[in-house]
Image (spheres, helix red, strand yellow):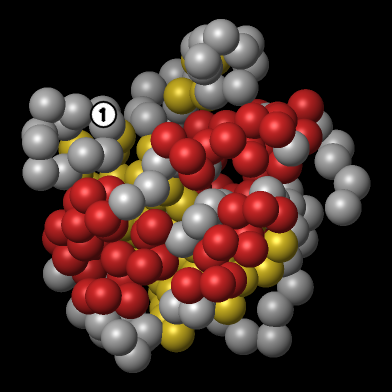
Amino acid sequence: MSYQTEQEKFWATDFGNEYPNRNEGEALIASNIALFSKILRSAPTVKSAAELGCNIGLNLSALKRIHQGLDLRGYEINQLAAKVAINQRMAEIVNTTITEPLASHKKFDLTFTKGVLIHINPEKLDAVYENLYSLSNRYIMVCEYYNPSPVAIEYRGHQDHLFKRDFAGELISKFNLKLLNYGFNYHRDTYLTNDDTTWFLLEK
């Protein structure tokens, strides 16, 4: 696999290999179950979902526990994380970058990212947006750090590896999507351990 940006190499190699050690366990899955249960109340017909940037599959695991019959797929750039997700057998996992076109013979009721768009090189965001849109039958959800205008901030001592912006607003404008629902996750909420992120559920 070739990497066109420094951010892709960052997540595909050493730093990405270490990430699962800081982000695993039942507490995170329970938090994700609470979050996705809330989101899916506005999209009750979802029977399939694809996650762009699934890492070890904590979000997919939560979705599978909410509804065992969900048809799930995850795309993950880091090979070690993808192997962990594959071994859990809760979804089809594809080890690839999401900044290139994702060919697929089928679409999903819901496509989503969670804490992923913030780490994409801004010049590659349009490609990821295209994948979210083209793989979706109906719904798109993004759960990311929000800022009304684009800004780069330091991430664990690294520059240009975390970006805040209005991702949902850009998707709405680019594809003429409808905003169905949104919500904020507060880092002091001990039940929802999702940091200060904002989620947006969009519809085609």
**Nearer the observer, 184 or 93:** 93
Amino acid type, residue under disc 1 in the picture: Asp
Please report the residue visible at 53 percent of the width from the left and 37 percent of the height from the top. 19
At mark 1, the secondary structure is: loop
Residue 188 lies in what quarter of the image?
top left
- Position of residue 111 measured from the top left corner of the image (x, y, whole percent): 47, 65
Residue 82 appears left or right of 27: right
**Nearer the observer, 8 or 43:** 8
Please report the residue visible at 43 percent of the width from the left and 35 percent of the height from the top. 22
Q: Residues within 10 Å of mark 1 (few under 14, many from 20)?
A: some
- Position of residue 9 measured from the top left corner of the image (x, y, whole percent): 77, 34
- Position of residue 116 measured from the top left corner of the image (x, y, whole percent): 51, 42
Q: Reply above or below: 59 against 171.
A: below
Residue 187 appears left or right of 108: left
- Position of residue 46 measured from the top left corner of the image (x, y, whole percent): 32, 80
In which quadrant is the C terminus drawn? bottom left
Residue on which disc 1 sits: 196
**Nearer the observer, 153 or 80:** 80
Residue 145 appears left or right of 150: left
Q: Reply above or below: 108 against 39.
A: below
Q: Please identify the residue farthest to the right as the structure is shown.
A: 2
Please report the residue visible at 37 percent of the width from the left and 84 percent of the height from the top. 70
Can residue 52 be seen from the camera position used here? no
Q: Reply above or below: 178 against 88.
A: above
Q: Please identify the residue farthest to the bottom as the structure is shown.
A: 69
Residue 25 appears left or right of 78: left
Residue 157 lies in what quarter of the image?
top right
Can residue 163 be seen from the camera position used here? yes
